[in-house]
Amino acid sequence: MIIAVDGPAASGKGLLSTLIAKKLDLVRLDTGLLYRAVGQALPDSVDLKIDKKIVINAAKNLKISDLENPALKSENSGVVASKVAVIPEVRQYLLKFQQKFGKNMPFGKRGVILDGRDIGTVVFPNADHKIFLTANANIRAQRRFAELGKKGIKVKYSRVLDDIISRDERDLERDISPLVMAEDAFLIDSSNLKPNQVLDIAIKYIFRDDKV
Ligand code: CDP
């Protein structure tokens, strides 16, 4: 079984995917980490518009162990990720990485769940279940701000909101694999819902007509 969870920054995709993975015994891949890791592999001096080859090579050489770096959780890492994510060749290499992950299902597991922006549209257009999770930008910024605070990362609320809005714009407007809801995806607006309520709605959707 393959489950795709897409949606904008800080919409709760990560938490929802983790909860679904636990409940249904699936392996989860947070595909945002791939883009974050590509950004992280670059030297500080890199100019993303000029040194595209360096960026493309970072995507080509990405390893699963690169995703464990705690620095990938920073606000800045998300911003850089959304900049490398507009480069078509980067997406091409990461597409192969994600499809390979989905096909090499670990023994004994029931399936995989991937969360990102283009999982239901591009990476696995034939996924068994597709969820598009959204929430309004202020609520997403408040959640991300609280999350960073818990990790001891100091950042201004206005900066978090600005980053989310600018990332939304870049993700929605890029030419290749923009953030768009797949026609056959199930929409959940989590603005006024608690994590467990979102989980319940998602599980009901996944078990619709017993297609698990
Ligand atoms: O966790 P959050 O929603 O803030 O971001 P993320 O999922 O870690 O993604 C970081 C950035 O990577 C996004 O803003 C996108 O630009 C890019 N991304 C993408 O283009 N396609 C994906 N499947 C996942 C992430």
Image: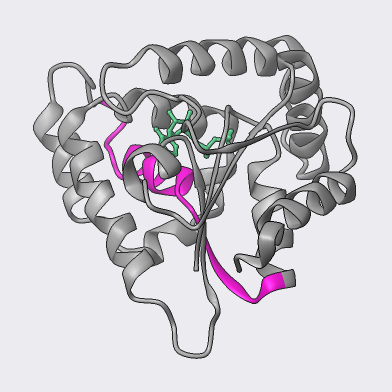
Could you tell whether 196 is left or right of 176 in the image? right
Identity of the residue drawn at 28% across and 65% down: 100
Image quarter of residue 84: top left
Q: Position of residue 26 (x, y in %)?
A: 58, 72
Identity of the residue drawn at 38% across and 59% down: 66
Closer to us: 133 or 210: 210
Residue furthest out toward the front: 209
Could you tell whether 106 is left or right of 9 in the image? left
Identity of the residue drawn at 21% across and 46% down: 58
Closer to us: 133 or 155: 133
Q: Position of residue 60 (x, y in %)?
A: 17, 51
Regarding residue 36, the answer to whether it shows in the image is no
Q: Position of residue 9 (x, y in %)?
A: 59, 28
Magenta segment: 24-45
Residue 161: in magenta span: no
Image quarter of residue 74: top right
Regarding residue 72, the answer to whether it shows in the image is yes
Q: Is residue 165 above or below residue 97?
A: above
Identity of the residue drawn at 67% across and 67% down: 210
Q: Position of residue 22 (x, y in %)?
A: 71, 70
Could you tell whether 193 is left or right of 113 in the image? right
Could you tell whether 157 is left or right of 187 in the image? right
